[in-house]
Amino acid sequence: GFSVEIYEKNERAGGRMGVVEFDGFQFDLGPTILMMPQMYRDVFEFCGKNPDDYFQMVQLDPIYKVYFADGSVHEATSELTRLISELERISEKDAQGYLRYLGDIYERYLLAKDHFIGRGFRTWSDLLNPTTLSAGLKLKTFNNAYAMISEYVESEKLRELLSFQTLYIGVSPYNGPSIYTIIPMVELVYGVWFIKGGMRGYVRALERLFTELGGVIHLNAPVEKIVIDGRKATGLMVQGQFQPADIVLSTADFPYAMKQLLPSDFRQGRYRPSQVEKYEYACSCFMQYIALDSRDFPGLNVHNLAFAEDFSGNIADIFDGRFPKDPSVYVYAPALLDESLAPQGQLGLYVLTPVPNLKDGPAIDWKDEAAIATYRAKAYEKIRRMLPLQDFERHIIREKVYTPLDFEMDFNAFFGATFGLRPTLMQSNSFRPQPKAMRYDNLYFAGSSNHPGAGVPIVLMSAQIAAQEVLRDQVP
């Protein structure tokens, strides 16, 4: 085995999968929607452990409720009979189209999993070979997610329901590659789950497993530099002290690592420190963590989405650098399922509004308290008008907000881009930063800006690929 030490910038491990705590309330800081549950279990099973001894998952049904501006509500479910009933309420023809979409995208998902998502691209021959090129053509990635969905269904509501999930990884459904329409399929086929204690419960499980296996975690220990000598990384500079290492695996946001931790002549394919500002970045999030003195809100689901009346205009605002005039809002209420996350009889609301990153939206002043009050009010109005939370404001005890500036400062997320590099066609798969450094024999990378991309299960896969690359190089 390896002797492994983690140097963590903050007072807790977990990065953006952190926790916000106050007055007896616990809020997941970032990720909340748990898909592909086997990915969460794999690391424990690989280590010979039973995941059920470390964390408990329950499947959610309904998955979420979606509220439209015309007052209609769609209840997403992974139970096929109920799903078809929901779809037939929209259109029998579109229900048929949805089933065709499901079969086609599942086939493409298996191709992507086997040939692209689950492997690294160390050399061009890993991509430019008949098997991989043939699989790539079958993926049909050259149109966008919304256009691809539109080939199967005519209802605008259903098109929005099957394309908004690209925002889970920070890319517009009108520009993101069509392969990302696998996300609603994954929700149906593998379900959406919840971990007791929230996503922080999974971080604690990983910490426990890591330390049981002999790993050491250094908290409040920000890395200042990855030290390079010739073709090798020799260690880290941590708070002015050199920490030698035989192998270095960086999970800092890759653009930040290039710009701040690595030499100016670093190269990783087309990625280099001098060009880092020119790359395309995913959107960010404006977060509100709201403590309520009541839990009595009939009809509220654990996961809730309120769509903008002009959905395409909302998306255009986000990716053209404007705070949305009419935002779409996601509201998460986990204490409805796990009462330990809020004081008895009370409720915490996690409210997320997708917003531009700091590069795309320089005109938004996140230090302006008056502007932030306006953004909070926009979310309040949307929640009050569209969700079963009409009088929630009179129940507010306390609120904390989190902006793109906070993501940049607390987690070194470049430009405050919550999901890292935007997964455009030219920043995906073999065109995304790979786990093995090209010029250095013992330097590796993992994280949302690296291949295969953002989202917790995909970042876990990124870590798995990086570990496989380490074993390939370092184990005789």
Image: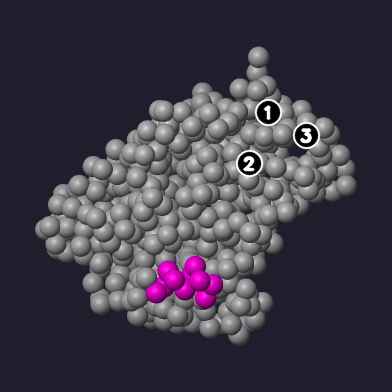
The image position of residue 370, as x and y in percent, is: 60, 85
Alpha carbon distance from label 1 to label 3 = 23 Å
**Under tag 3, what secondary structure?**
strand
Of mark 2 and mark 3, the one earlier in the sequence is 3
Is residue 198 one of those drawn in magenta? no
Magenta region, main secondary structure: helix
Residue 214 shows which numbered tag?
1
Sequence order check, earlier mark of 2 and 1: 1
Identified at 30% across, 76% down, the residue is 69
Q: Name the residue under label 2.
A: 269
Provide the secondary structure element on which disc 2 rests: loop
Query: Could you tell me which secondary element the residue under label 1 belongs to?
Result: loop
Amino acid of disc 2: Gly
- Camera-nearest residue between 404 and 292: 404
Q: Within the image, what quadrant is residue 92 found in?
A: bottom left
Q: Residue at x 24, y 55 (%)?
A: 151
Residue interval drawn in magenta: 313-322
Q: In this view, does 178 lie above or below 7?
A: below
Could you tell me the amino acid type at mark 3? Answer: Ala
Q: Does residue 44 sit above or below 345 in this rendering? A: above
Query: Where is mark 3, residue-wise?
Result: 233
The crowding category of the residue bearing disc 1, from other C-alpha atoms within 10 Å (few below 14, some 14 to 19, many at least 20), is few
